[in-house]
Image (tube, helix red, strand yellow):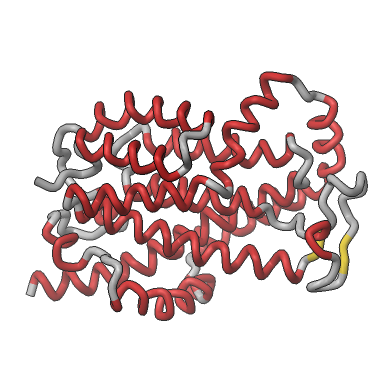
Amino acid sequence: MLVNGLPGKGARLFILFFLFSVSMSSACRYFGILLLFLLPCRFAAAQQEDSVIAVMGLSDSSTAWYQEHGYRINKTYVLSYFTDLPKVAGSPLRYSARDWRTVAFVTAGAGVFLLTDKTVNKWMRANQEQFYTEVAKVVEPFGNKYPPFIIGAMYLTGVVTKNRKIEHASLMTAKSLVFSTLFYVSTKQIIRRRRPLYTQEPYEFNEPFQGGREYTSFPSGHSNTIFTVATALAIEFKETKWVPPVAYTLATLTALSRLYDNRHWSSDVWIGAAFGHFITKAVYKVEARKKEKQMLKLNF
C-alpha cells in the first residue's frame, strides 16, 4: 500500500542506502541515527494524502496519480529537463504582485548583507570555538557531498518498496538540483567575486570567466544546493509537520558553516539560499501546471 511518505520499512531502507553510499562517515552516522528514530514514527502509518498535489491546489489527491503520471527514469523524465528549463527560466514573466514583493525583500536583504559583509566576516572569525567548529564539520557536507546520496537513497527506497511517491519525489528533487546548479554555476562564472579566504575586502571582483577558484565566491554553491534539497523535501512532505522545520534548520546551519569557515561573504550565502529556494519553487510550479492539465483529463 502506498502512503504519504516512507513506511517504516522504507524509512530504514532509506537510511541504509544513504549510510552505505557515503561510507559511514562520522557526520553521516549522527544524521542516520537521528533519522532512524524520527522517520518511522511519522511515516509508519498511512496518512490522508499526497502533500504536493494539495499544496499546489489540485483537487485530486489520489495516489493513483503517481502510478500513472509520477516520474520514472525514462524518456518522459529526461525530456522534461529540456521542456521545463525554459519555463523555469521564464518564470519571472508570470510573477504576481506578491512574487514581486518577495523579489523586493530578497533584493533588500542582499543590499543589507552587502553593506555588512565585512562586519559579519570579522565577527565570524573572532568567534571561533571548538563546539561551533565541530558543528560546522558535521553540516558542511550537506551542501555538496551528501545531497546526491540523499536523492539516490530516496530513489532506491521508492523503487525497492514500490512507493511511487518517493520515487517521483527523488526525481523532482534531482531535477530541481540540476536546474539550480546550472543557474548558480553560470552566475559564478560571470560575477567573479573574490573569496574572503584570500582577502579582507568584500568588494574585490575580476572580469567574467577570469581568476580561477579564488574568484568564485558569489553566490554560495553550498547554500544553493542544500536549500534546493530542503525546499523540495519541505514541499513533498509538507503534511509531515516536522520535515520543513528540520530541513530548513539543517539548510541554515549548512549555509552558516560557509561563513564560519571563511569561504563566503554573507551576501553570497543569502543569494545562494535564495537561488536554491526559489528555483526549486519555480520547478514545482511548472510541474503543478502540468498536473492540473493531467487531472482535468482524468476527470473527463
Query: Splitting the image into 4 quarters, where does residue 176 fall?
Result: bottom left
Where residue 218 appears, as percent x and y from the top left, is 74, 57
Work out whether residue 108 or residue 181 is closer to the camera in this orientation and state it. Answer: 181
Q: Is residue 118 left or right of residue 48?
A: right
Work out whether residue 8 or residue 99 is closer to the camera in this orientation and state it. Answer: 8
Residue found at x 68% / y 24% = 132
Query: Image quadrant for the C terminus?
Result: bottom left
Where residue 182 appears, as percent x and y from the top left, is 58, 68
Up/down of 243 relative to 191, above or below: above
Residue found at x 49% / y 59% = 177
Residue found at x 14% / y 75% = 297
Up/down of 104 relative to 243, above or below: below
Query: Splitting the image into 4 quarters, where does residue 282 fall?
Result: bottom left
Q: Is residue 255 left or right of residue 20?
A: right
Where residue 53 appears, as percent x and y from the top left, is 25, 56
Where residue 290 appears, as percent x and y from the top left, is 29, 72
Q: Is residue 22 left or right of residue 266?
A: left
Query: Splitting the image into 4 quarters, where does residue 136 fall?
Result: top right
Up/down of 179 relative to 247, above or below: below
Q: Is residue 138 left or right of residue 149?
A: right
